[in-house]
Image (spheres, rainbow, N blue to C red):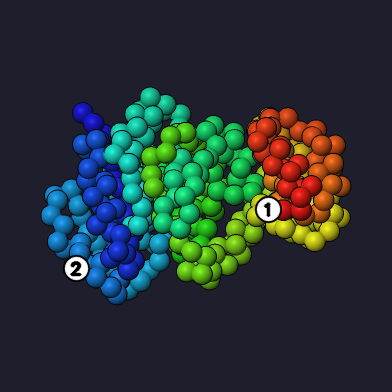
Amino acid sequence: MNPLVSVVIPAFNAEKYIVGCIESICHQTYPSLELLVIDDASTDGTCELLKQIHDSRIHIIRNPINRGLAASVNQAIRIAKGNYIARMDADDIALPTRIEKQVNFLETRPEVSIVGTAMKSIGFGNFIHRFPLSHDACKAQLLFNVCFGHPTVMIRKNVFDSPENFYREELQQYSEEYELWCRLVNRFRFANLPEVLLHYRTFPPSLKSEAEQKRKINSFAIRQNFIMQELGVPASSAFEQHDQAANVVKVSTQEEVDKTMEWLMYLKMQNQETHAFDPDALDYELSKRVFECRYHNRHLGVPNLWAWYQQRVLKGYSPTLSQHLKFIGRTLTGM
């Protein structure tokens, strides 16, 4: 018998996309599903559209007041009947085999509690977002950013047996998942499937600038706490350098880039004391950040490029030949 999967879809003013989202779940190749759609006090036509969808697997919960994404997801998890919880956003599209492939993965790997997938952006931009495949790589990436595409994750329901493992509702929809992964990573095993199994809708920056700013503020605090907890790093203004590496910030001087590089090497040394991260996974993540910081600051010219070749002391991440040539070419042409 196939284990039941509870698909959790929080929705707020999602009339443009909610029907397509729900249809993508209803048409999954995996048969044993329930859909929990939480209408978070929408003021558009979302509620009316939901009433027109007739499928016994769909359960609609309407909040009388807007509670926010984190509270809505927690609400659905508490009433979910499935062995697994699958997340979806109301404007995304799940590919037909998504649920089946994630269930098969978790059924054959009992040590893993949370699995995500790669995802492709639709709407504004057309990119494939890939995430680390192993648990150790996921944990290393958390030093800088999320290790899952949030709407792609499937989580064992027993993860939420403890009330301490729910989303923190005060974060609403601003990095609530980042904080959760940092909190769970030492207690549960993570993984990602390499295949694109979800289309993730993105919007022009002007439509989400306020939300992005709130997310950046929360993410900065989450990163800082995670680094202090895992690597024993004291609170310091050097966290600004870490934020530059996490967000790949373009700076105005070579000295600023060099300070960020020194900070990344400091994290490596701290890990040699704490052993919080797998050394190879950490080296890969740090070397990737070194390259990205150097590449995105190529306007600093040949000294920055030369510093990259001198600093290749970390193992694991190796830019492709195309990336190498692009770095050299754009540095020399000032692009």
Mark 1–mark 2 Cα distance, whole angstroms, equals: 43 Å
Give the amino acid at mark 1: Val
> Where is residue 163 drawn, in percent x and y?
43, 52
Pick whichever, 56 or 195, lies toward us: 195
Provide the residue designation for mark 1: 248
Quick one: SS at disc 1?
loop
**Observer able to see residue 270:** no
Question: First in sequence: mark 1 or mark 2?
Answer: 2
Pick whichever, 268 or 243, lies toward us: 243
Side of 59 where 151 appears, left or right: right
Pick whichever, 291 or 281, lies toward us: 291
- Could you tell me which residue is drawn at 76 percent across and 39 percent down? 268
- Could you tell me which residue is drawn at 65 percent across and 55 percent down? 247
Quarter assignment of residue 75:
bottom left
- Could you tell me which residue is drawn at 42 percent across and 26 percent down? 109
Give the amino acid at mark 2: Glu
> Where is residue 195 drawn, in percent x and y?
43, 34
**Observer able to see residue 329:** yes
> Where is residue 187 drawn, in percent x and y?
52, 39
- Could you tell me which residue is drawn at 20 percent across and 64 percent down? 49
Residue 48, numbered circle: 2
Residue 164, numbered circle: none
Q: Residues within 10 Å of mark 1 (few under 14, many from 20)?
A: some
Q: Quadrant of the N terminus?
A: top left
